[in-house]
Image: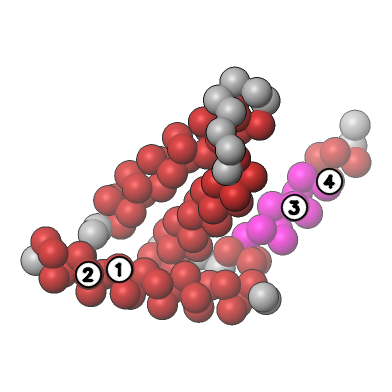
Amino acid sequence: MEFEQMQQRARAVRSRYAEVEASAYGRSWTTEEVMLGFLGDVGDLAKLVQGKAGVRPREDLDEALAHELADCLWSVLTLADAYDVDLAAAFTSTMDELDEVLAGD
């Protein structure tokens, strides 16, 4: 899947979540609430990384890790969309900057 397709898919899923939230809570989540959900996902990811290190083993570790990484990516895509950040361009620019820094060592 191309990056723009991922962004569109994340946007579509966020829109569906907004509908569910509006039905359940009378409004959709704010950007701040999406960010708090992302923080929860990062905490879950940290536990799974511990599992890969043998500290928190579980039978479905690889599947759970892949799922949580995808959840985190969805949150990043959703936040970038909410703030009109061209994430593909920002990623390229940031990697270029890091390459320059690393080349200077």
Residue at mark 1: 17
Alpha-carbon span between mark 3 and mark 4: 9 Å
Q: Secondary structure at mark 1?
A: helix
The numbered mark, 1 or 3, whose residue comes first in the sequence reads: 1
Q: Residue 5 sits in which quadrant?
A: bottom right
Spatial CA span between label 3 and label 2? 37 Å
Query: Is residue 47 something one can see in this rendering?
Result: yes
Quarter of the image for the N terminus: give it: bottom right
Dot 3: what SS?
A: helix
Q: Is residue 89 left or right of residue 40?
A: right
For residue 100, the mark is 4
**98 in relation to 14, above or below:** above
Mark 2 vs mark 1, CA separation in Å: 5 Å
- Disc 4 versus disc 2: distance between alpha carbons? 45 Å
Vertical comparison of 76 with 53: above or below: below
Q: Is residue 93 magenta?
A: yes
- Per the rendered image, the range of residues in magenta is 90-99
Amino acid type, residue under disc 2 in the picture: Val
Contact check, label 2 and label 1, Cβ < 8 Å: yes
Amino acid at pointer 4: Glu
